[in-house]
Amino acid sequence: MRFKEKNILIIGGTSGIGLAIARQLQAEGAHVTVASRKTSEAIEELGIAHLELDVLAFDPAFIKDLPNELHGLVYCPGSIRLRPFERMSTEDFRQEYELNVLGAIQSIKAVLPLLKKPDSASIVLFSTVAARLGMPYHASIASSKAALEGLAVSLAAEFASAGIRVNAIAPSLTDTPLSQSLLSTPEKVEAAGKRHPLGRVGQPEDIAKAAAYLLSDEAGWVTGQVLHLDGGMSTLRIL
């Protein structure tokens, strides 16, 4: 198992993509810890350690219950707030930035000493296809996630000498609890699928497999990248 004896922290991993990553890593032998505001029944059933952490009211004291060293950090929190720009307040943009960017910054700062202890470690952040592909009503999400992509490549350059790789994954619409309002009927699912060249929306397992690769030693020469897992949406046009 490629993660045997490795310690991975997932922030925001109690449902959706984060939960799928937790399952994938645990199945491959990792010692997984999830940090979020609340635990979930799924995390409890898996027997995964859970630490309480609110990234919007960040308390770095949670690290006292982490292992002495970390081989990976995954930062998953996000939101789907789709509104016309004219109806969005400055506070809406601030909240997105705090959740997506400042939360990631504080998390990385808190655990960086633990990531430096092994010979190598990996950080995986989450962007969105909308950060590069203009979409209506995505202004607050796209702007904060674009900032996160900038953070990822900057830290990849800064941390390379310490053996810490930093990459980001930019999914398109994925079937998770967060996106249920967009996929609440078979008709909506079909319409969303047709907007992707591969003809379907993403599944959490699609993203989890890619995250596991980026965290693994198999990706030991991969850093500073934004991996677009979007069914071809960002680069393809089917005529």
Image (cartoon, helix red, strand yellow):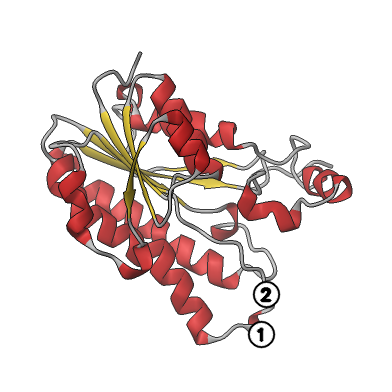
Crowd tier of the residue under label 1, counting other residues whose Cα lies within 10 Å: few below 14, some 14–19, many 20 or above: few
Q: Residue at x 58, y 52 (%)?
A: 129
Question: Does residue 117 appear to the left or right of 1 in the view shown?
Answer: left
Q: Residue furthest top?
A: 1
Image position, residue 106 (x, y; %): 26, 61
Q: Is residue 223 visible?
A: yes
Q: Point out which mark residue 65 bears.
A: none
| Mark 2–mark 1 CB contact (< 8 Å) | yes
- Tag 2 secondary structure: loop
Question: Does residue 154 appear to the left or right of 63 in the view shown?
Answer: right
Q: Residue at x 22, y 53 (%)?
A: 62
Q: Point out which mark residue 83 bears.
A: 2
Front in this rendered view, residue 124 or 231: 124
Residue type, mark 1 in image: Arg
Q: Residue at x 30, y 35 (%)?
A: 8
- Tag 1 secondary structure: helix
Q: Residue at x 26, y 52 (%)?
A: 155
Quarter in which the N terminus is drawn = top left
Image position, residue 12 (x, y; %): 43, 50
Q: Is residue 227 above or below residue 61?
A: above
Quarter in which the C terminus is drawn = top right
Would you name the residue on which mark 1 appears? Answer: 87
Residue 206 picture quarter: top right
Image position, residue 165 (x, y; %): 27, 39
Question: Does residue 85 appear to the left or right of 198 in the view shown?
Answer: left
Question: Does residue 225 appear to the left or right of 235 in the view shown?
Answer: left
Residue type, mark 2 in image: Arg
Q: CA distance from mark 2 to mark 1?
A: 7 Å
Q: Is residue 8 above or below residue 111?
A: above
Residue 57 picture quarter: bottom left
Front in this rendered view, residue 203 or 149: 203
